[in-house]
Image (tube, grey):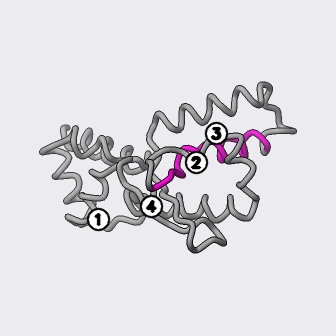
Amino acid sequence: MDDLLQKIKAGSQATKDIPWPGQEDNIIRMRILNDQDYLMATLAADKIITNVTVANVSKYNGEVETQLLYRSVINPETGKNLGAITDFRLILTPEIKVVLVDELGALHDEHSPDPSNISEEEFDKLFETVKKNAVETVSGVSNIFTLRKLVVSLATSRK
């Protein structure tokens, strides 16, 4: 549990170094995304695809995904993005995108797991920790379902 709690508290500070897909000697760093990243990715996609319809929703969702990956992938030496988004698009093939999306999902799962994957005992310990130190603990949770379960649990315990 302490390991889970430390990972959750790390929140968007959590990173993982991985090789760029297909290039074992080219190491990149992936970081957990925060609310600001999701907002900025959506706003950027909205500027590119201004009229989302049933016909182009897949293209829009693909652009949001690209924007999220752009914000998640950083140079481990500089801590900055790998250039401009236009440059990133040039190296982001569909096959590489699939690998990076999977890596990002695994990183999020590791540091802010879905409550359905947390044992009741682990969740109870997390719940008690949140009751003692809510701001520090909850600020690191990036999984909305974990936050929702914590809020519901806290609200029902106060009755």
Which residues make up the magenta segment?
59-76
Residue at 71 percent of width and 26 percent of height: 47
Which of these two is toward me, 69 or 39?
69
Q: Position of residue 154 (x, y in %)?
A: 24, 42
Question: Is residue 104 inside the magenta stretch?
Answer: no
Question: Is residue 65 inside the magenta stretch?
Answer: yes
Residue at 16 percent of width and 44 percent of height: 131
Q: Position of residue 32 (x, y in %)?
A: 44, 51
Check disc 3 and report the residue beneath it: 84
Check disc 1 and report the residue beneath it: 120
Which numbered marker is on residue 109? 4
Q: Main secondary structure of the magenta part?
A: helix
Structural distance between the alpha carbons of marks 3 and 4:
28 Å
Q: Position of residue 51 (x, y in %)?
A: 80, 26
Which numbered marker is on residue 82? 2
Q: Amino acid at mark 1?
A: Glu
Q: Secondary structure at mark 3?
A: loop
